[in-house]
Image (cartoon, rainbow, N blue to C red):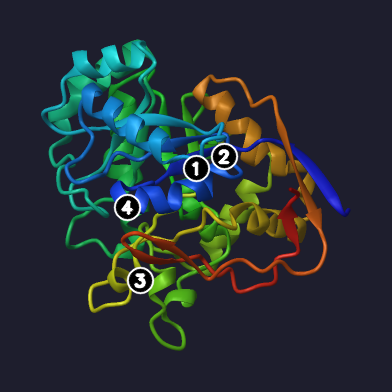
């Protein structure tokens, strides 16, 4: 197969940051994706409808003039979140979902939830009004190994929340484990899961073998090879429970390459080339469109995009090693393999 045509993809988990960084990296996602769920973990976080409106306006201003890209906004759930404001923002079409960060789990999550009982009323209102909850699924208990945080979260936090809140529609974001795959697959129509590009490619050896590789460090952290293989099997299966959320997360190089480097892989530039390579390796190119373009809209109850893109296969494609922004350079994720697929002009 030398070419494949897909409905234009969407990205169901994306970090665009703000200011000079936003201006520098927003065009990278807008080039190939039609829509994206925008993460609200700015400083300060996007917690109200008014803040989401202002942030959406800044994103729109940063896009190329001819861009058809649509940012789908989210609100950052805190223990003080106002259910009425969330419901109003969703009913008006301003926001698409609400994001749950356990406090301290990842970048800019200090305002997240510590006591899950304090957000029970918000979650009940969301269930009643069909508002999806995007979940960063890790516990932060100091006695839990970082490689076990996702599996423990499912048992201690996620499953109890879903049992207590019937009808709550939940997206397990950027799952990284076999346990996450199994739980999502068995969860029914109210549960979906996003899988990132980089977690299909790297395991924890990529970060640690031969020296510390900061540009492969992300949260949730990459796990053992058995978990990467479970993710690949899920993503390429065609199962509607799984869809693309790149979690593309830009940090300038000085903040990645230091004694306490930031977590995140920036994959917006070459994601579709990497995914085509992965799906070809798994003999599943016929299911790439489901993962990138159909399953996500179906879960979010949105129509798939009408327009299409075509990927062609040829000589290895060269992508820039870095994207220059007004804040500094951002390293593009290196998949450690040749990429033969690219989006046709």
| Residue assigned mark 3 | 253
- Mark 1 vs 3, N-terminal side: 1
* N-terminal label among 3 and 4: 4
- Which mark lies nearer to you, 3 or 4? 4
* Mark 1: few/some/many CA within 10 Å (<14, 14-19, 20+): many
Look at discs 1 and 4 and give the one toward the viewer.
4
Identify the residue shown where x is 37% and y is 35%: 134
Where does label 2 land, which residue?
Answer: 242
Q: Position of residue 210 (x, y in %)?
A: 46, 88
Q: Mark 1 points at which residue?
A: 194
CB within 8 Å, label 1 to label 2 = yes
Question: To which residue does mark 4 refer?
Answer: 20
Q: Which of marks 2 and 4 is nearer the N terminus?
A: 4
Nearest to the observer: residue 121 or residue 160: 121
Disc 3 element: helix
Q: Which of the two discs, 2 and 4, sits closer to the camera?
A: 4
Q: Vertically, is 129 above or below 69?
A: above
Q: Position of residue 311 (x, y in %)?
A: 76, 49
Against 331, is 237 above or below?
Answer: above
Question: What SS does tag 2 mark?
Answer: strand
Q: Is mark 1 on a helix, strand or loop?
A: strand
Q: Residues within 10 Å of mark 3 (few under 14, many from 20)?
A: some
């Amino acid at each position: 197969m030398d070419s494949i045509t897909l409905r234009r993809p969407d990205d169901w988990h994306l970090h665009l940051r703000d200011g000079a960084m936003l201006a520098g990296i927003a065009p990278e996602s807008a080039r190939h994706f039609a829509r994206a769920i925008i993460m609200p973990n700015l400083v300060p976080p996007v917690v109200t409808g008014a803040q989401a409106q202002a942030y959406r306006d800044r994103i729109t201003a940063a896009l190329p003039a001819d861009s058809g890209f649509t940012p789908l906004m989210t609100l950052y759930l805190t223990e003080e979140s106002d259910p009425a404001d969330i419901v109003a923002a969703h009913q008006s079409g301003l926001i698409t979902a609400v994001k749950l960060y356990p406090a301290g789990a990842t970048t800019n999550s200090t305002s997240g939830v510590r006591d899950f009982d304090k957000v029970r009323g918000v979650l009940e209102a969301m269930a009643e009004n069909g508002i999806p909850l995007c979940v960063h699924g890790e516990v932060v208990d100091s006695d839990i190994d970082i490689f076990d945080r996702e599996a423990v979260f499912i048992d201690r936090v996620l499953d109890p929340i879903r049992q207590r809140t019937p009808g709550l529609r939940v997206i397990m974001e950027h799952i990284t484990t076999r346990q996450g795959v199994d739980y999502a697959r068995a969860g029914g129509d109210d549960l979906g899961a996003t899988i990132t590009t980089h977690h299909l490619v790297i395991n924890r050896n990529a970060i640690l073998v031969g020296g510390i590789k900061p540009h492969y460090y992300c949260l949730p952290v990459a796990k053992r090879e058995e978990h990467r293989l479970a993710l690949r099997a899920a993503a390429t299966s065609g199962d509607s429970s799984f869809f693309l959320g790149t979690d593309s997360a830009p940090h300038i190089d000085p903040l990645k390459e230091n004694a306490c480097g930031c977590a995140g892989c920036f994959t917006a530039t070459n994601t579709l080339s990497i995914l085509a390579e992965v799906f070809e390796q798994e003999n599943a190119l016929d299911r790439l469109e489901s993962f990138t373009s159909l399953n996500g809209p179906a879960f979010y109850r949105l129509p798939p995009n009408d327009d299409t893109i075509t990927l062609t296969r040829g000589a290895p494609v060269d992508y820039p090693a870095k994207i220059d922004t007004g804040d500094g350079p951002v390293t593009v994720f290196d998949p450690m393999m040749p990429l033969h697929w690219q989006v046709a002009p």
